[in-house]
């Protein structure tokens, strides 16, 4: 049996997951806490009969407070509740396909060296698309990076990193990431869970995404910008430490930070410039 229930939507009528429902009695004591699921539904355990106060909170949305009546059976309903975005929230890009512009997008991998410095590698060739959902949380994405495009600024090191001892770019030419949704964490920030395939290994990875806005470009198109970052563990992708040493980056840390600055152009393909 459930207690107090509700169904939460955004201003466009789409379900909002990860909304926290907190219930207090008339003295202000918390008596229940629950979180909405992917459909926007939430329900507490059965509650003491009487009047209670329910507060719903979610990143990027204004909080909502309601008074509810709990029956003698311990149940009650708030019905459907619409959440409004926080004041000054960013304007989201229009729904539909957006294509990654490789000329104006960069992928940087940074690893610590000797605990006091950083080694950076840039992947110069990235492509893919983002399909913005009618509800932004339903946005999906796909990106692929050409492994052989790695560039640390030292050609001998780069050739070794491309070799079978490290990235093995002939056997695994592409690094890919796919995702089918977003979870809002702030006014202009989201978490994008997905799957990263690297060096023949597939792992679940969460990208922390910051949205930079959208607008017209000088070539007659519309662009949107995103920054994303995550931490990878070298051992998760079968990268051998001895190969790292032979590649000339001995004493490198096992954690690698990935930063992506991505520009996308509205439409199925890039416009001619």
Image: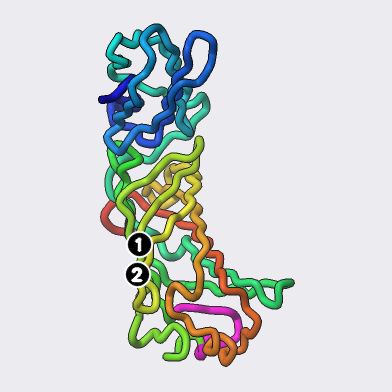
Query: The N terminus is located in which quarter?
Result: top left
Q: Nearer the viewer, residue 198 or 157?
A: 198
The residue shown at (47%, 13%) is 25
Q: Can you tell which mark lies on residue 195?
A: 1
Residue 70 image offset from top left, x and y in percent: 34, 11
The residue shown at (61%, 74%) is 253
Query: Mark 2 near mark 1, Cβ–Cβ under 8 Å?
Result: yes
Mark positioned earlier in the residue sequence (2 or 1): 1
Residue 161 image offset from top left, x and y in percent: 50, 85
Which stretch did the figure color magenta?
149-160
Q: Can you tell which mark lies on residue 131?
A: none
The residue shown at (30%, 9%) is 72
Q: Secondary structure at mark 2?
A: strand
Q: Is there any visible trace of residue 77 in the rendered image?
A: no
Horizontal side, residue 54 vs residue 96: left or right: right
Residue 230 image offset from top left, x and y in percent: 50, 59
Compared to residue 161, the image places residue 183 above or below, namely above
Q: Nearer the viewer, residue 170 or 2?
A: 2
Residue 80 lies in what quarter of the image?
top left
């Amino acid at each position: 049996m459930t207690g107090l229930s509700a169904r939460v939507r955004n201003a466009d009528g789409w379900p909002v997951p990860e909304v926290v429902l907190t219930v207090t009695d008339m003295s202000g004591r918390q008596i229940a806490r629950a979180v909405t699921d992917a459909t926007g539904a939430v329900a507490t355990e059965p509650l003491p009969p009487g009047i209670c106060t329910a507060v719903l909170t979610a990143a990027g949305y204004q909080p909502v407070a309601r008074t509810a009546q709990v029956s003698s059976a311990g149940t009650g309903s708030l019905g459907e509740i619409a959440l409004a975005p926080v004041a000054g929230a960013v304007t989201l890009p229009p729904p539909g396909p957006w294509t990654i512009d490789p000329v104006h997008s960069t992928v940087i991998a940074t690893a610590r060296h000797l605990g006091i410095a950083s080694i950076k590698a840039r992947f110069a060739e990235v492509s893919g698309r983002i399909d913005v959902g009618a509800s932004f949380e339903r946005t999906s994405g796909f990106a692929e990076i050409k492994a052989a495009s790695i560039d640390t600024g030292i050609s001998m090191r780069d050739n070794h990193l491309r070799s079978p001892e490290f990235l093995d770019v002939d056997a695994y030419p592409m690094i890919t990431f796919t995702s089918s949704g977003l979870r809002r964490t702030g006014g202009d920030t989201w978490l994008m869970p997905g799957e990263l395939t690297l060096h023949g290994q597939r792992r679940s990875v969460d990208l922390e995404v910051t949205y930079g806005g959208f607008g017209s470009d000088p070539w007659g198109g519309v662009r949107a910008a995103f920054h994303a970052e995550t931490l990878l563990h070298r051992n998760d992708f079968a990268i051998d430490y001895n190969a790292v040493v032979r590649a000339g980056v001995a004493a490198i840390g096992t954690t690698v930070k990935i930063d992506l600055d991505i520009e996308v152009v509205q439409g199925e393909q890039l416009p001619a410039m």
